[in-house]
Amino acid sequence: MTDRESLLNISKEASEDDGAIGVISGMPTDETGLLTNNTNSNDNNQTEPIFYVRSRTTAVSRPNYESLDYEVCENALFHDEERKRLQERFSIRKDVIRWIIFIQIGIITALIACTIDIIIEELSEFKYKFLKNAVDNNVPMTDDSDRDLAIPFLYWILLSIVPVSVGAALVTYIEPITAGSGIPQVKSYLNGVQIPRIVRIKTLAVKAAGVITSVVGGLAGGKEGPMIHAGAVVAAGISQGKSTTFVKDFRIFKAFRDDHEKRDFVLGGGAAGVTAAFGAPIGGMLFSLEEAASFWNQNLIWRTLVASIISSFTLNIVLSTYHGLDGFTFTGLFNLGKFDQPLTFEYFELPIFMLLGIAGGLLGATWNFMNTRINKFRKRYIPWKIGKVLEAVLIAMVGVTLASAMMFFISDCRPLGNDPTIHPVQLFCKDNEYNAVAALWFQTPEATVRSLFHDPPGSHQILTLAMFTLIYYVLSCATFGLNVSLGVFIPTALVGAAWGRLVAMLLFYLFPETNFLHPGKYALIGAAANLGGVLRMTISLSVILMETTGVETSFFFPLIIALITAKWVGDSFNEGIYDTQIEVNHVPILPWEPIPQFKGLKARDIMSKPVICIKLQDKAHYIYKVLNGCNHNGFPVVDNVQNNLRSKGRVCGIILRSQLIVILLKSLYVENKRFWVPETSIQTFRDVYPRYPSIESVRQLDNKENYTVDLSMFMNPSPIRVNTHDSVPKIFQTFRALGLRHMLAITNENRIAGIITRRDFIYK
Amino acid sequence: MLKKILSFLILVGCCHNAISLETKKTCKHLVGELGDSQSKFVYCVTDHSVPVALCVDCEPLYANMKNAYQTLMSIENCSKIYSNADRINIVSTTQEVLTYMWNKANCDDCFRGNHSELYEELWNSFNSCLTIHPKSECTDCKIEYLTLNNFYLEMDKANKGRVCFDLQDSMNRTRLKWSDELKCCQREVKMTIFIITVCLVVILPLCIFYSTAVVLTKRREAEHGVINHLTPELEDPAPSTSALITAAILSTPQETMSEVQAQIEKISDVVEAPRTKALFNLSDSDDLSTDDEPILGS
């Protein structure tokens, strides 16, 4: 078998859950045999053999991803609606409502972000205050030997594992989709992959609770990714004007109930989420632009920016009021704080920044590699739910242990009062001194980033910072991928800031007479380099960093240098962590460019065939059978069929599975046309969105009645068609740019030859 | 007419000048006083910089200076001359700098309530204790030190960290003396129990957890080795249809016998038909009229 053939075979096999091709072509015979075996074993008690097959079949356990229907179905009903709207006097209404929704998205996302933030802050404050007192009261003295530091250590463990176990249990048992940061999921969604349950209200609730508990528990993670996911859920929820979970339809925003409109709102929601997380409205907008750039237009950019600005303003008001500040001085949840004096740089520092960028790229690539390995290990060895919860608890305990060991064994004492420390712990230091190690650990990771940026030079020993970098690097690597909802942004920035500062300190130690080594500046560059090395985001990341630190325009250049070097170096080893996550989970996401293996191929080489088609006027029985027999989502509508050979018909449109089910459910047959025609509109089809009924909900058709369905009114009469000898890279571009789900391959006579779906472009 | 107006203007100008000359004299005098009081205050502050005692010792001078400034500014004409006079704005700048220092040291706090007196008392008793017991300070003066320290901590808490800097400095020095010079703050580095706890609470469960996970998985995989060997492609990234169907079938809950029977028949129908046809497909391409709608044909 040549390479090309094998490619063809697998693509057929993979694509059939989506496109409409015959079941047989995709089923290798040996596996069919296996299947039969299993069916037989179903007979006698279904225990062992079934378990065998499932035990290592990762393919089975993962969700079977579907695509989203981004293509607007411009059928006759749709055109009727458009025409009616044109006749109305206020035909701009839909546009106005769209604006209102975007503004609401901004406000509500920001409010949710505020709530999460305030709860985290209060609980952390309580926790670390309690621990500080516990440590203070239990330091062994010469004259009081009963005290022991094991007591505060145990308290710390307890205060970590209780929230973490709650969070991990919530995520594992209630909504597994909320695990991780949520950015890969939102990215896949915007790319056009239907991720099950990603934008439900339950997901939002679990995500919020999950992120609060894990950050309070002290895991090495941040709340930024989850904020973005929360924004996306809010957007998807508000724009629909109904909640399927609560069975409540507010009867508003009905015009927006399809994937196409929803995607635009989710885009805005994601942007609002980023904005709320970082206080970076332009960064938020650019984040959406970067992650979903293929589906953009000017109006949408503008709406998204407005949603972002509204979000950042709302957050500002609420948090400023909460912190009792005058004016709107509090920006963003992840506020890195403004630098006291303007950051300047000398020209001979640029090579140093570049070296930092290279280091960031190497460290980031290593981090991604290690993280992927760890997660592979997890996937294979810890498949049990209880195991996942236990592992999260254990990692939390390891973190606490390492932190306490570092605190107890490194005595890095600094005089009190020189730099701002929230919870100064004396430990073994003299009176009037505090332990700088404890100061690093006794706060949320976010606050640690801030202190690494702004603490005056000489706040830490070199050993302290080196150990801290090492421990946090390993810890964050082990944490990302646990079954808790946590983002990766803050730990990455923290590690970067730590080693950046470390570099400045080492250089200063070696060349004490230099005066350009501002540790905060190097911490910022280090954070940028590390983020660039791990996340590999470009535009949005740089703008976010600029907006969160508010550095001068002249300092953009060093930042960009560090970021881009890190990205180049990292990219030569592996992909960014989000893309790696997507790949590891086998999400069929479309890359920017077609994979090289497709170069020089023609449409007929990758298309799936034969195609199950439906005649323009077809029997209801046939449609029912087709829907029952296969789970494809789009069916070409054909006419000019000879000898009932539908798969040789002439293409005149495409119809979706959901539409067919609605037709059957509502009995929209030719024979009883006069009953339903007046009250049937496009709204009939939108009402069931987004959880379409399955074919099982259609009752068995009566065999005696021979109804006919006329699809000319319902089908999309303008499907995207390509010729069988069109080149694959070309049609890939079309497919990606238009966000298509189905693409029909036709012969020169406009007869159906095959169908191309997302899967045909993915698996080699 | 023009002349008249001009002469009137000149007259007015002269009068105005005459008045301002008069005020200028007073103002000059007042500014001199302010400068004098400022220099005295600066001298006092610098003189009392180590150990810091600027609040208590320089308070009268600060009050003088404040008064002089207020007197100067209360006369409208003088304030006009000396405030916003030019870019450097010397008078208000020097005053601002000195006031800033006063405020930064939280000096007003020293004169609020009676805590400075109380502190003074405790501090004196502690110091006298040190002189009484020159050899055994650590044991004999511990109570005094702790009372002083606790009093300071309480005060710090009550003032939200904005304690008068005189007291802060005095306390800092006392603490340094106590722990650095006298070496009385003996904290014992005692880690045995901590290390034992770590081993018991963290390392042991960690080892147990991961070794159990690995052992269980290995055993499970070894038991199913035969099938794993037969179907290595199930590990492939692409989820194969049969795997998906299998999963769908297997994940259905246990049903009654008759239901199972019916289901099996249905499934075997589906499976049998495509299998034969798949074979067919391989040998013969798409000439046949029925290979078109496979499920429905049977």
Image (cartoon, coloured by chain):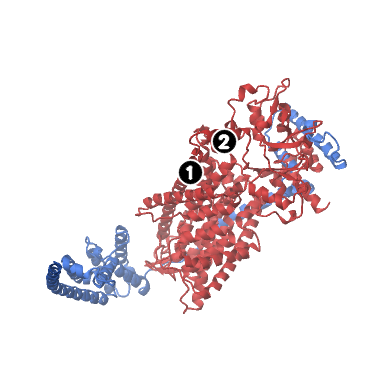
Depicted A581 relative to depicted A237: above or below: below
Nearer-the-camera pick, A99 or B69: A99
In the picture of the structure, the residue carrying the numbered disc 1 is A99
Nearer-the-camera pick, B111 or B298: B298
Q: Chain of mark 2?
A: A
* Chain given the colour blue: B
**From the viewer's perspective, is A584 left or right of B226?**
left
Nearer-the-camera pick, A40 or A138: A40
Looking at the image, is mark 1 or mark 2 earlier in the sequence? 2
Nearer-the-camera pick, A442 or A593: A593
Dot 1: few (<14), some (14–19), or many (≥20) neighbours within 10 Å? Answer: some
**From the viewer's perspective, is A2 left or right of A470?**
right
- Inspect the image, locate mark 2, and give the three-letter code of the amino acid beneath it: Glu
Chain A hue?
A: red
Specify whether disc 1 shares its chain with disc 2. yes
User: Which secondary structure lies at badge 2?
Assistant: helix
Q: Position of residue A113 (x, y in %)?
A: 46, 48
Disc 1 + disc 2, Cβ < 8 Å: no
Q: Residue at x 24, y 75 (%)?
A: B42
In the picture of the structure, the residue carrying the numbered disc 2 is A82
Residue B287: quarter of image: top right
Dot 2: few (<14), some (14–19), or many (≥20) neighbours within 10 Å? Answer: few
Q: Chain of mark 1?
A: A
